[in-house]
Image (cartoon, rainbow, N blue to C red):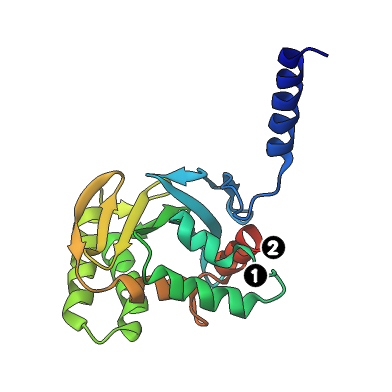
Amino acid sequence: MTSRSLVFKVAAFLAVALSIAPSSVHAAAALIDSATKIQFDDTLGGLSLFGVGVRKKGPIKVYSVGMYSDDETKASISSIPKSNKDGALSTLRTSLKSATATTFLLKMNFKVGAEKMAAAIAESVAPRTSDKAAVEALKKLILDGVATKGAATPGTVLRFDCSSETGVKVSVDGKEIGAAPGLCEAFCDVYLDDKAVSPALRNSCVENCCT
């Protein structure tokens, strides 16, 4: 065997080995919310999809929500077994405090008026923070964004970009409305703590990100 052919064989072997080598971090994949059949892309602005879930109000499936964050946060829970759900979610919430960015993407499945939509989200955030002025600011941003189209109709997309620097930035159908300061942790807890508004999202994050 010539040295040249040996090099090619070694290179081919390494290529195959690397392609099947297990990764310590689960690769992001597009997901469909089983309750609404609404799909979420695997990435959003450089962030990876962690999980999806439905927000219900009684029997009504109001919207589907997808959570995106950075790879470091995903790595923090990738080695935790799915059976340790509480431990995984506790670690996830802690890791999100230092994440570069976390986004919650809400895709409407049921028509909700602008005022009712803004009030519902604000009322979920309020018990999780002492900054009532920031909650009112968030409520107004959502109201202003949704009011331009009359209501949050099916297909409307509300995006909430959370970071420790800017707080919670609100966008509606791709148009940025503004940011409410200091609510990053509280907003994340709306979807991830023990009284989360979408238990399905919590379960999905564990199922898709843990071992």
Q: Is residue 19 above or below residue 99?
A: above
Residue at disc 1, secondary structure: loop
For label 2, count other residues whose C-alpha is less than 10 Å away and answer few (under 14), some (14-19) or many (20+): some
Q: Amino acid at mark 2?
A: Thr
Q: Is residue 98 above or below residue 108?
A: below
In depth, the one of 192 and 4 nearer the eye is 4
> Quick check: can you spot residue 201?
yes
Task: Name the residue: 74% across, 26% down.
Answer: 10
**To which quarter of the image does residue 124 belong?**
bottom left
Q: Amino acid at mark 1?
A: Ile
Task: Name the residue: 52% across, 82% down.
Answer: 194
List the residue tagged with mark 2.
Answer: 211
Task: Name the residue: 22% across, 54% down.
Answer: 145
List the residue tagged with mark 1.
Answer: 80
Q: Position of residue 50 (x, y in %)?
A: 53, 57
**To which quarter of the image does residue 6 belong?**
top right
In depth, the one of 104 and 33 nearer the eye is 104
Task: Name the residue: 66% across, 62% down.
Answer: 207
Residue at disc 2, secondary structure: loop
Q: Position of residue 176 (x, y in %)?
A: 22, 49
Quadrant holding the N terminus: top right
For label 1, count other residues whose C-alpha is less than 10 Å away and answer few (under 14), some (14-19) or many (20+): some
> Quick check: can you spot residue 67?
no
**To which quarter of the image does residue 204 belong?**
bottom right
* Labels 2 and 1 touching (C-beta < 8 A): yes
In depth, the one of 166 and 169 nearer the eye is 166
Q: Is residue 151 above or below residue 41?
A: below
